[in-house]
Amino acid sequence: VLDLCNVIAGPTIGTMLARFGAKVTKVDSPRPTYSPEITVLYGLAANAGKRSVLLDVSPAEAAGRAAFEALVARVDVVVYNGTSDALERLGITPAELHRMNPNVVLSRFDAYGGPNEGKGERADHISYDDNLQAALGIMERFGGGLGRVEEHAHV
């Protein structure tokens, strides 16, 4: 399994697969999206049982892209929990993944569905837990009363 996931739900899926015996390789960007403190703490918790590699997989980075293609050629599944637009900006489309490995399965998941999947008006929205709680009215219902929404850490 090649894990391209970020933020809670995605890394949890990869960790569960690793606990069930899958060989999971987590691909991270060499430019982390979190502060170093959060990256280390979160990475230890969310990526337990996985191998890890730092790769710049953008088309402009030939060495990183070649290493990524070699990884895709050896896996059965690629998991990803971001928008399809973000993958497309990196030149990673289902067709491109199948060019690298005709048998690979892309498991992409989010709350609203991808923009090409006809899932409605929010299909291109990012869907982190906080966004979903707000969209469903959970924050308003349980946010502390008087219409005040409280912040809750997810680390």
Image: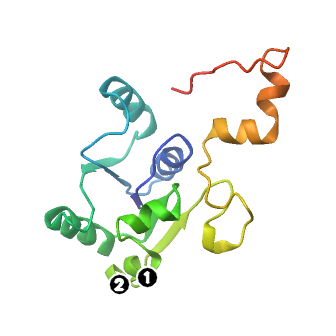
Answer with left or right where residue 14 lies relative to residue 154: left
Q: Is residue 152 left or right of residue 146?
A: left
How many neighbours does mark 2 have within 10 angstroms: few (below 14), some (14-19), or many (20 or more)? some
Residue highlighted by disc 1: 95
Above or below, 141 relative to 99: above
Indicate the position of residue 111 as horizontal and vertical percent values: 67, 53
The one of 130 and 20 positioned closer to us in this rendering: 130
Q: Is residue 144 left or right of residue 62?
A: right
Please tell me whether mark 1 sits on a helix, a strand or a loop.
helix
Residue 75, horizontal then vertical, whole percent: 36, 69
Q: Is 102 or 55 nearer to us in this picture?
A: 55
Amino acid, disc 1: Ala
Please name the amino acid that badge 2 sits on.
Answer: Arg
Residue beneath the point at 51% across and 55% down:
82
Mark sitting on residue 99: 2
Q: Is residue 42 above or below residue 147?
A: below
Disc 1 from disc 2: Cα separation: 6 Å
Residue at the spot 38% in from the left edge and 43% down from the top edge: 49
Mark 2 falls on what kind of element?
Answer: helix
Task: Please report the residue visible at 26 percent of the width from the left and 71 percent of the height from the top.
Answer: 69
Colour scheme employed for the rendering of this structure: rainbow
**Vertical placement of residue 4 versus 12, above or below:** below
Give how far across and how far down residue 122 sits, in percent.
Answer: 70, 57
Quarter of the rendering containing residue 64: bottom left
Label of residue 147 in the image: none
Instruction: Pinpoint residue 63: horizontal percent, then vertical percent.
Output: 14, 64
Q: Are marks 1 and 2 in contact (CB under 8 Å)?
A: yes
